[in-house]
Image: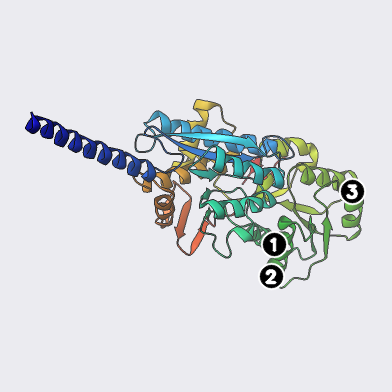
Amino acid sequence: MSKARDGVRILHFFRQIVVAAMLLSCAAFAASVEEGVTDNTILIGQTVGLTGTIAGAVKEMNESAHAYLSSVNKQGGVHGRRIELRILDDKFSPALAAANAETLIKKEHVFALFQSRGTPQTEAILPILAANNVPLVAPSTGGEMFHTPVNRWVFNVRAKYQDEIVKGIEHFAGAGIKNIGLLTYDKDDPLGSDGVAGFSKGMTAFKLTPAIIVLFPRLKPDFNATAAKLIAANLEALIVVSSGENTVEIIKAIHAQGGKMRIMTMSNNSTQKFASDLGPAGRGVVMTQVTPAPHLVSSVLGQEFKAAAAKTGATASYAAMEGFVSAKVLVEGLRRAGRNPTRESFIRGLEAMQKVDLGGLMVTYGPDDHTGSEFVELTMIGKDGQLVR
């Protein structure tokens, strides 16, 4: 009987060892699984202005991003995992963008953030990314601060605002126009500081002297007084570095007061809603773009965009094309992260993207380069309100 009892004890002991080993193994596996990743899904977070002054641009941008992600999910996702987006409205408020980022990372436990919108809004979430080691892919801003110095957690896709401004000055200078002015936000606004820096860089490059630099506040600007000041400067051309409704209202005010200068603004305003809101005042306005044309079906990218947009009813605009391209970069990074993705493998996967052709747009990253694309071209609003190249 003693031997039998000893045998039972030994068997029970070995069972305890096996159970403990299994528990340790499960614990180790659980610890190795990254937040936001399950067997079937990868959760991506987004804080963006679904309402507010840039809601029109965000709608077009998100429609096409969703169109691409939907097509990927229908084909089985990335390594068998569907991509899910958790979106919070920051109303284009930097403070709310920061709060949303905290919520998405600490409460929703997203794997990464995607496609914020706005320079001060994206700046507000940088400390949260760094504190939690969470990457952000494709912020919809060309702010220099997100490129230099390289931020390990931020992967830009679109070109820099300063490059867009230089492109506009090159265009005017090539047409023999020398009397060029700038309107942008106050220097303590990140977009305003980029506007002044890019304008200075471009004017110096083409050996031109600024005719006038006018700064106005982002909140509650006096459009009529600002327009009068610009018209009084007798400008041949004006570069407007501002966003959304502010840009629409200042162009309308200039037009209403009889201003005749040529006007250029940037890709952050490039939506069909923007052109529609301008109405007759938009005719002839030059706009820089950071993606190929959405209607350019001669490119692989254009063909893919057209097919995806047709299935979901996404708007065909440059803002929409930016969202589409951003989603492509996100997915490519997830694919390169491997079958058991971690945030570290995701970062390494993105940084391994060297001269990757997305079908007509080249994207390059590296440990010392998170710029992505340097593509900039010019378009103009035609008499029918459509953008023409």
Question: Residue 386: in sight, yes or no?
Answer: no
What residue did someone put label 2 on? 206
Amino acid at circle 1: Ile
Instruction: Compute the Cα span from label 2 to label 3.
Output: 32 Å
Amino acid at circle 3: Asp
What residue did someone put label 1 on? 169
Q: Position of residue 343 (x, y in %)?
A: 44, 49
Label 2 secondary element: loop
Instruction: Compute the Cα span from label 2 to label 1.
Output: 8 Å
Q: Please tell me which residue lies in front, 98 or 290.
A: 98
Q: Which of marks 2 and 3 is nearer the N terminus?
A: 2
Q: Position of residue 168 (x, y in %)?
A: 68, 58
User: In the image, 221: left or right of 264?
Assistant: right
Query: Which of the two discs, 2 and 3, sits closer to the camera?
Result: 3
Q: Residue at x 47, y 44 (%)?
A: 330
User: In the image, 144: left or right of 22?
Assistant: right
Q: Where is residue 363 in the image (x, y as percent from the top left)?
A: 47, 54
Q: Which of marks 1 and 3 is nearer the N terminus?
A: 1
Label 3 secondary element: loop
* 374 w.r.t. 258: above or below: below
Label 1 secondary element: helix
Q: Residue at x 45, y 62 (%)?
A: 367
Instruction: Compute the Cα span from label 1 to label 3.
Output: 26 Å
Q: Please tell me which residue lies in front, 297 or 41.
A: 41
What residue did someone put label 3 on? 222
Amino acid at circle 2: Phe
Pointer 3 local density, CA inside 10 Å: few below 14, some 14–19, many at least 20: few
Q: Position of residue 247 (x, y in %)?
A: 77, 46
Name the residue furthest front.
2
